[in-house]
Amino acid sequence: MAGSELVSSLEQWWHQIEANGGDMVLTLGEFSTNPERHGITKVPGHVGFTLDMRSQNPAILDRFDAYLKARSAEIAAKRDVAIDLGPATRAAPAPMDDTVQSDLVAAAQHCNVGTMSLPSGGGHDSATFAGLGVPSGMLFIRNENGSHNPEEHMSLDDFHCAARVLTKWARCMLSSA
């Protein structure tokens, strides 16, 4: 129950950040008990979980870290349990280049492909390039089952739309070089 309370309060905090205009992505990647120790009538004794929190704003990341630690301590004391947050990793936000992003939007408009701005906090390889001063941007393809899961799937029509946008963008870049 302590784990559930913590996750619920983190979700509420996330919604408050977004309601106040902040950008944030919070993913609970794992939440499990040991199958050899749990059962319908047994208290599992241990819950393992992972959290992935991202924002383009380092101040939000700092506030989240502080909230996570404080809230964990409150819940642990109230429920007489130990909450070990384990090791944390933290990657600096990697903003994408405004020109690359606007040029991708223009290419999408030329191809009659709808767009939406999506701060992911991810960056993937683009974060490395951006950190080295290479103007970078990301083009996402919608995924009917959500990203990073075993049922991840995109339609070939969506893939073709993205390929047309990327081709148009690359041709424009080459013609202006």
Image (cartoon, helix red, strand yellow):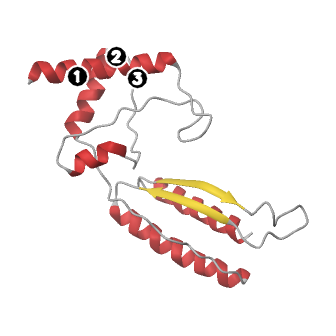
Q: Residue at the far front: name it.
A: 36
Q: Which of marks 1 and 2 is nearer the N terminus?
A: 2
- For image coordinates 39% across by 28% down, the residue present is 115
Q: Residue 164 carries which label?
A: 2
Which circle, 3 or 2, is nearer the viewer?
Answer: 2
Report the residue marked by disc 1.
170
Q: Do labels 1 and 3 touch, CB within 8 Å?
A: no
- Viewer-side residue, 66 vs 92: 92
Label 2 sits on a secondary structure element that is: helix
Amino acid tagged 1: Ala
Q: Is residue 73 left or right of residue 43?
A: left
Residue marked by disc 3: 114
Disc 1 versus disc 2: distance between alpha carbons?
A: 10 Å
Q: Is mark 3 on a helix, strand or loop?
A: loop
161 above or below 144? above
Element at label 1? helix
Residue 164 position in % (x across, y down): 34, 16
Image vertical order of residue 175 relative to residue 89, above or below: above
Mark before the other along the chain sequence, 3 or 2? 3
| Mark 2 residue crowding within 10 angstroms, few (<14) / some (14–19) / many (20+) | some
Q: Distance between the residues labelled 3 and 2?
A: 12 Å
Residue 7: % across, % down: 63, 63
